[in-house]
Amino acid sequence: MRPVALRTPILAASGCFAYGQQFAAFTDLRALGGISTKGISPLPRFGNPLPRICETTGGMLNSIGLENVGVEAFLRDKLPFLRDLGVSVWVNFFGVDFETYVDCARQLSEGQGIDALEMNISCPNIKKGGIEFGTVPEVAHRLTRACVEVSRVPIVVKLSPNVSDIVAMADAVQKAGAAGVSLINTITGMAIDVRTRRPKIATTYGGLSGPAIKPIALRMVHQVARALPDLPICGMGGILSGEDALEFLMAGAHCVQVGTANFAEPDAGVRITEELRTLLGTLGFSSARAAIGSLQAHAAEPEHLVESPWMSS
């Protein structure tokens, strides 16, 4: 299976960049390393009722409900635009049970120009009482294995942070054949309107993203990178600047995704790319690759540098 090569380590994150087309008028999409699409399911979904997004201190809550056009419409109407950009195309996907995950992976892998399938396992299994696929290592292992076996392109598993042992989850999907992991997905949270005494989003709970979760994301990236040094990691969570991106690389990520920042600044990914390039030069790094895993360890912990298969320069 071919490796995933990126021109730059900065991608647009799933769920925060639609299908790319919507941002074409506001930024140079070709300056990005890649784009991860909205989550795609076998059939179209209309998502959750409004309101389904709100600002919080240092971030935002969302409960969009994975609204998307479905596999058939994506392959026909959305993929050709992405394929022609010349950037790495990652297609985020999900299902509501074991069978729909596998079916979605199989259909999407037939699409021309897809570099990776990013499997979102932070979804409730409706046949198992709503438990998330991404909370039990054995379940995540079986699901990942089944999807890898039917896919013609690498599968990167997007892990949920709402677990007690993120390393165990990453180890499970790596052993199942995952090409890498994305860390992290949103953290479950809520917000209340004290004047109406109602939750600020219709589903009560939503996914917290933005700068507020960055320390947690960095910690999880570092934990996984130390425990599983051969597993490529795409880091994300509150990246607003080139310095933020470099922190993730130093912690052990091989590339990063910019998400919530796009809502306030559609050109954020390109700006962060330029900031990272300048900062790397200022700090004496020959390339982004040289920064990966370069966090200076304590005396009792030897420094570990990781060679990245996800960047060509």
Image (cartoon, rainbow, N blue to C red):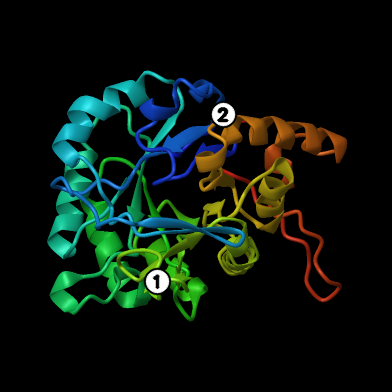
The residue carrying pointer 2 sits among few (fewer than 14), some (14 to 19) or many (20 or more) residues within 10 Å by Cα, namely some
Q: Residue at x 42, y 20 (%)?
A: 85
Type of amino acid at the residue the image marks with label 2:
Arg
Residue 214, percent from left and from top: 62, 60
Q: Which is more N-terminal, label 2 or label 1?
A: 2
Camera-side residue of 203 and 302 = 203
Cα separation, mark 1 vs mark 2, equals 49 Å
- Quadrant placement of the N terminus: top left
Q: Name the one closer to the observer, 174 or 52.
A: 52
Answer with left or right where residue 112 lies relative to residue 208: left
Rendered view: 126 above or below 113 = below
Left or right, 19 with reference to 13: left
The residue tagged 1 is 196
Q: Residue at x 13, y 60 (%)?
A: 99
Q: Classify residue 92 as left or right of residue 159.
A: left
Q: Is residue 310 visible?
A: no
Q: Quadrant of residue 154?
A: top left
Numbered tag placed on residue 7 in the rendering: 2
